[in-house]
Image (cartoon, rainbow, N blue to C red):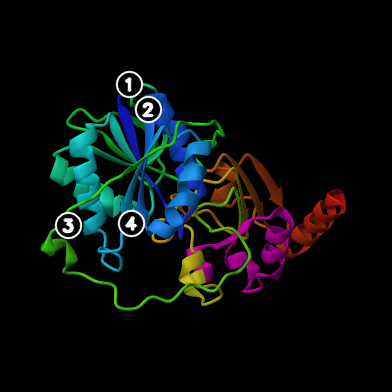
């Protein structure tokens, strides 16, 4: 059975959930093989987690010589591993970095590329939501090694032990790959909530909040959810751009998306309509968002959300 390479998304060895989802998808296509690029001191923690979620093989690339550079060294590392392994496919998380790595790798390997997939069948056929979510498309790579980026929350991680065979892989990085270097980085202040693009539940607010996001945040905290915002809320200065969900913001695909005071313009819908279940609260019963939802509440979010939050907290005990 051919290997399916999965590039590991991690923070200091702590493997992010979307990578575990990719391992579950990889098992449909072949033998899951993770590619960990990071510090040697963090490799042990990562390899244990990856093996627990089905990785049969784990390529470990010590990034001591390439740390601090932009994505090209990772591209070259994947290219060299692919040359040795001749994988059935290469899967990456559909993040900004993941898509850039995938695009550069596809050019180098002369392979087909599919981005923002929400499912992968056993034969390699992917499902995508395209043209601002107006169509659902089935696509399949027909040339080279299929390179596919997958949106977070598109699959359920499966805790099933893999062999977890570790191979230390030494890569040769070109001088050209080291011409763009990160000179400074500042960690984002922690909110205590899940990362927006990875959260299983997202609670978003729009123009209808009037700038008061307290009911949004209270409901999100009751549900253990991330907080999002529409472009209107961001443009009004009520929330930072990092919270924006939409075509010019972040694309999310949670299990539950709760839209509050959001009209449902196509710009916003493009960023969230692959969510598994969508709930909307809006005073305007003619709002376009109601065309998309599974459940809709016509009412004032400042009345509905506190009542919902109170009930949730009561039922949580």
- Say which mark, if any, is on residue 1: 1
Residue 68 included in the magenta stretch of the image: no
> Can residue 118 be seen by looking at this rendering?
yes
> Can residue 152 be seen by looking at this rendering?
no
Residue 9 picture location, percent across and down: 42, 51
Which region of the structure is painted magenta? 204-233
Question: How many neighbours does mark 2 have within 10 angstroms: few (below 14), some (14-19), or many (20 or more)?
Answer: many
Are dots 4 and 1 in contact, CB under 8 Å? no
| Circle 2: element type | strand
Residue 103 picture location, percent across and down: 23, 48
Are dots 1 and 2 in contact, CB under 8 Å? yes
The answer to which quarter of the image holds residue 68 is bottom left
- Residue drawn at x 50%, y 71% as measured from the top left: 234
- Residue drawn at x 35%, y 32% as measured from the top left: 137
The answer to which quarter of the image holds residue 151 is top left
Judge by depth and name the residue closer to the eye, 195 or 306: 195
Determine which residue is flagged by label 3: 173
Sequence-wise first label, 4 or 1: 1
Are dots 1 and 3 in contact, CB under 8 Å? no
| Circle 1: element type | loop
- Say which mark, if any, is on residue 97: 4
Q: CA distance from mark 4 to mark 3?
A: 18 Å
Judge by depth and name the residue closer to the eye, 185 or 264: 185
Residue 287 picture location, percent across and down: 58, 52
Determine which residue is flagged by label 2: 31
- Residue drawn at x 13%, y 39% as measured from the top left: 110
């Amino acid at each position: 059975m051919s290997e399916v390479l999965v590039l590991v998304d991690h923070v200091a060895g702590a493997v992010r959930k979307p990578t575990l989802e990719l391992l579950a998808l990889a098992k449909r296509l072949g033998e899951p093989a993770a590619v960990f690029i990071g510090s040697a001191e963090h490799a042990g923690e990562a390899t244990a987690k990856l093996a627990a979620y089905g990785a049969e093989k784990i390529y470990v690339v010590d990034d001591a010589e390439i740390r601090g550079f932009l994505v090209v060294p990772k591209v070259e590392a994947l290219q060299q591993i692919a040359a040795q392994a001749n994988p059935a496919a290469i899967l990456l998380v559909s993040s900004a970095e993941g898509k850039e790595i995938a695009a550069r790798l596809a050019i180098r390997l002369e392979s087909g590329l599919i981005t923002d997939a929400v499912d992968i069948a056993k034969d390699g056929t992917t499902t995508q939501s395209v043209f601002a979510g107006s169509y659902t498309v089935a696509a399949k790579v027909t040339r080279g090694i299929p390179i596919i980026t997958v949106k977070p929350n598109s699959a359920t991680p499966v805790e099933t032990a893999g062999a977890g065979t570790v191979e230390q892989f030494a890569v040769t990085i070109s001088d050209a790959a080291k011409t763009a270097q990160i000179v400074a980085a500042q960690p984002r202040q922690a909110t205590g909530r899940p990362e927006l693009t990875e959260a299983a539940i997202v609670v978003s607010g729009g123009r209808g909040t009037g700038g008061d996001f307290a009911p949004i945040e209270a409901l999100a905290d009751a549900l253990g959810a991330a907080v999002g915002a529409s472009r209107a809320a961001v443009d009004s200065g009520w929330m930072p751009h990092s919270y924006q969900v939409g075509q010019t913001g972040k694309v999310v695909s949670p299990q539950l998306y709760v839209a509050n005071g959001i009209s449902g313009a196509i710009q916003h819908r493009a960023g969230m309509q692959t969510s598994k279940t969508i709930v909307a609260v809006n005073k305007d019963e003619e709002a376009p968002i109601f065309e998309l939802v599974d459940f809709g509440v016509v009412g004032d979010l400042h009345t509905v959300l506190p009542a919902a939050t109170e009930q949730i907290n009561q039922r949580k005990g």
